[in-house]
Amino acid sequence: MDKATEKFISKYNEINKNYSKHLTNLEITEMLLEEEDNAFLKTKTKLSDLEPHIMDCWSVCNDLETIFKQVGDGEREPTEDEMMNTLLGMKQLYQWKFEQLFNTYEKVITTSRNGSDND
């Protein structure tokens, strides 16, 4: 018997034992499926936490376009110091953004794994 089947039977027996009234097989199965759906929704909610971080990281393209426009079509060309400061600032900013994205990703993975381990 595989692990998933053992887990299902174990939960089935636990639900059946803990209820004073006799439940039908269908009622117990529905309870088990509802439990699984809730675990999935909790994980899904956590996955949605990644979206703002991902979208925020995409703004690097807009920021680079602003630099291209200033260098190519701006009223004045940035000085070498302005360019270096801008690029160094962007480098640090996006390093933080990607760190925050990755930290959120790690939390989602941990939550997802813990959710499936506890079921």
Image (cartoon, helix red, strand yellow):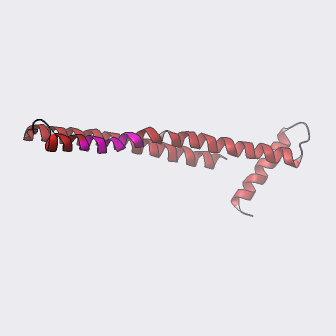
Looking at this view, is 57 or 36 the one in front?
57
Asked which quadrant contains residue 52, the reply is top left
Residue that protrudes farthest toward the bottom in the picture: 1
Q: Viewed as shown, does residue 8 lie left or right of 72?
A: right
Asked which quadrant contains residue 42, the reply is top right
Total labels drawn = 0
Asked which quadrant contains residue 5, the reply is bottom right
Looking at the rendering, the stretch of residues picked out in magenta corresponds to: 54-65
Residue located 8% across and 41% down the image: 80
Q: Position of residue 70 (x, y in %)?
A: 17, 39
Magenta span main SS: helix
Q: Position of residue 50 (x, y in %)?
A: 46, 42
Residue located 69% across and 59% down the image: 3
User: Magenta includes 91?
Assistant: no
Residue located 51% across and 44% down the image: 108
Q: Viewed as shown, does residue 11 lie left or right of 61?
A: right
User: Magenta includes 63?
Assistant: yes
Residue located 74% across and 46% down the image: 33
